[in-house]
Image (cartoon, rainbow, N blue to C red):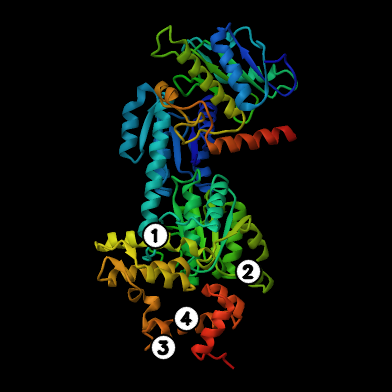
Amino acid sequence: MNTLSEHSILISPVEELAPELLNPVVRDIQKIFGYRTAIKSLLQDVEFALDTGRSQYHSTFILKKLAGLAPAGVVKILAITRVDLFIPILTHVYGEAQLGGKTCIISTHRLNEGLATSAVESFSRRVVKEAIHELGHTFDLRHCQDHACIMHYCRSIKDVDRKSDQFCRYCRILLADEIKRLSST
Amino acid sequence: MNSTKILIVDDELIMRESLAGWLERDGHVVETAASGEEALQKLKEYHFEIMLVDIKMEGMSGLDVLTKVKESDPDVAVVMITAYGSISTAIEAMKNGAVDYLLKPFDPNALGVLIDKITEHQAQAREILYHREQYKDRTRFESMVGQSKPMQEIFDLVQDIAPTNSTVMITGETGTGKGLAAKAIHTNSPRCDGPFVVVNCGAIPKHLMESELFGHQKGAFTDAIETKKGRLELAHGGTLFLDEIGEISMRMQIDLLQVLEDRIFYRVGGTQPIEAYFRVIAATNRNLEEAVKAGIFREDLYYRLNVISFSMPTLRERKEDLPLLTEHFIRRYAQETNKNIDRVSREAMDEMMLYEWPGNVRELENAIERAVVMSKSREIQPDDLPIFRPEHLADPHGNTLKEIEKTHIVHTLDENQWNIAQSAKILGIDRSTLYSKIKRYQISKPA
């Protein structure tokens, strides 16, 4: 992890995040995407996105706000929140990303489903996978048919556990192309 | 992931946007319409595979949209979106041809499963249609066989280019396995779940080519008694293999170039543009560069097709693969014919190694197929191989080894314009031995 500088991925926890969840995210993002990472909270809360009727938070609103707060030179922003996220047509989402855009967000709210409170490592693995998955979308990657690929869309939390934390061969090539394109612009 | 073209019809902007965003991240191509009228207009302009239609809308209702869509384009899968209060209407819609309904807000899993189910069903339907309409010639798609350096290079190349979307041109003599290489690229690519559609440009009569490739609307011409999808449309989401590309007419070259550039085409007699996303692999045994120079093949199409190119080695260039290929074909045909044959005799293999195999692997395959049928023993003998049988050779009485050898030497010399060094190399003997055999057999150079 570095201080905030150009060409870095900014990890922006909304609420305080336990180090055992945050540190693996930082480590794996650096390793997989090859960018420096920095941690800075851009939003103190997400109450502006609350839908009182659903008691959930509209993730698209949060992404738009985050994009407006992006510090200059930051390549991508990953927000992490504890609140339950939704988009209007769906009951819930684990996360949302601007496809090929700057921002993405994940929610830890449903990621500990079926886990004992002591199963921190399993919880952390799910958080890392969701973080990489949503960041993958900001690098213009779509869902992948390969069940083991990190970009595979999981139907259930069990599928999240089953998939690896790596990109498949094809997604790796597409990611490398996109990183190359970004570095040349 | 294969993208599906989806039209969302909902009069609420926020619903359209959130659904479109989710589907785009899932890899689909999404259009939206704020009303039934706008949806029907878009349907005239583009081809969609799935429509997600809200039942309750201002103006034209979702049910009305469904009825109109089913009249104009019955292949489109329509999914109704409904609130709790109108489930009965959704069920009514299913009776009228909707494939399913979703209760909003819906679980993302339910949407994903439904889209997958529909696209899988549509892909199967396309595949079935393709196979049904496929020409009767048997197409075998077994894996390529070979341990030689040229084949290892081909395997590496296939592995490297398969994940890309680039157009590929495969050249090589007849029977070298260009089709197998194309199929291997397809099966190793992200499109492997999509169809692999073969167009044998040399086998389809020129006057039928346009309809075969682009399909036709009912009534487009006298025999067009029903609307038929063309092979370009059937290849959507997969790979289009244009075999013997050098054989297509100049007119079809222009049409094909247009499709490759725009990915949009019209069925014969149709007015609705159809978009199809497929990878193109072309193959030819012709020298297309010379065809371009001669003005019989368009230069722009040549460069459009020739993005990545490679040449399949002849069997002559990889004779070390002959035992492996032979074993492969023996196993297959012994199994097909239920015969207990598992090898060729040493003598037969020696002869096979000397033979030139002008028809390449296909000739070898045919030879082994025939030998398996004819053989009376567990081991294939030289006499079982048609290439060494008297009727295959120039001399109908040449049934002794010496006569066969003489005929083979004459054939090799003729093939190589009596270049002694080259002929000796192919025959696997040195030049002095070849000279002595020419003298012994009293072979003379043709005038």
Left or right side of A7 for B325: left
Q: What residue type is labelled 4?
A: His
| Quadrant of the rendered image containing residue A69 | top right
Asked if labels 4 and 1 touch by Cβ distance under 8 angstroms, the answer is: no
Chain letter of disc 3 in the image: B
Asked if labels 3 and 1 touch by Cβ distance under 8 angstroms, the answer is: no
**Residue tagged 4:** B408
Place of residue B91 in the rendered image (x, y in percent of width and height, measured from the top left): 31, 32
**Residue tagged 3:** B395
Neighbour class for label 2 at 10 Å: few (<14), some, many (≥20)? many
Asked if labels 2 and 4 touch by Cβ distance under 8 angstroms, the answer is: no
Distance from the alpha carbon under mark 2 to that under mark 3: 41 Å
Residue at left offset 75%, top offset 21%: A6
For the residues carrying marks 1 and 3, which lies nearer the camera in this image? 3
Distance from the alpha carbon under mark 2 to that under mark 1: 29 Å
For the residues carrying marks 2 and 1, which lies nearer the camera in this image? 1
Residue at left offset 58%, top offset 7%: A15
| Disc 3 element | loop
Query: In the depicted view, which residue is nearer to us: B357 or A25?
Result: B357
| Disc 1 element | loop
For the residues carrying marks 2 and 3, which lies nearer the camera in this image? 3
User: From this viewpoint, is residue B72 visible?
Assistant: yes
Neighbour class for label 3 at 10 Å: few (<14), some, many (≥20)? few
**Both marks 1 and 3 on one chain:** yes
**Both marks 1 and 4 on one chain:** yes
**Residue tagged 1:** B140
